[in-house]
Amino acid sequence: DLFHGCWNRLLDAEFLCTYRHGIVIKCPDRLLGQVYPCIFTYSADYLKKVLIAMIKDMGSCPCQCCLMQKSSFEFLGLSRDMQ
């Protein structure tokens, strides 16, 4: 009931009009642009999210692609990584 109540509050007549017809706003480049709101929802339990993200939560390498060890996480994002 709470979930549906939240959506009823969010999807009021004003939002639905903006969703269908867009709204003109001043963009950071100082030009006017017509934008349309977009709502993205994703619903899954924790185990499915872990599978989709390919996270191995109990292993020493949480990523299946790069094989980076958890013990090396403190070295991520250094300037040498950008080379």
Image (cartoon, rainbow, N blue to C red):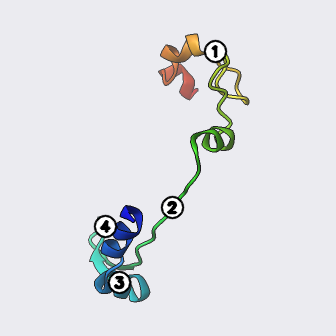
Q: Earlier in the sequence, mark 4 or mark 3?
A: 3
Q: Are marks 3 and 2 in contact (CB under 8 Å)?
A: no
Mark pair 4, 2: CA separation? 29 Å
Q: Residue at x 40, y 73 (%)?
A: 37
Quadrant for the N terminus, please: bottom left
Residue at the limit of the structure toward the front, as seen here: 1
Q: Amino acid at mark 1?
A: Gln
Q: Residue at x 26, y 71 (%)?
A: 30
Mark 1 Cα within 10 Å, few/some/many (few <14, many 20+)?
A: few
| Residue 56 picture location, percent across and down | 67, 27
- Give the camera-side residue of 46 and 62: 46
Q: Nearer the viewer, mark 2 or mark 1?
A: 2
Q: Amino acid at mark 4?
A: Asp
Q: Residue at x 65, y 44 (%)?
A: 48
- Give the camera-side residue of 27 and 54: 54
Residue position marked by numbered label 1 in the rendering: 69
Numbered label attached to residue 29: 4
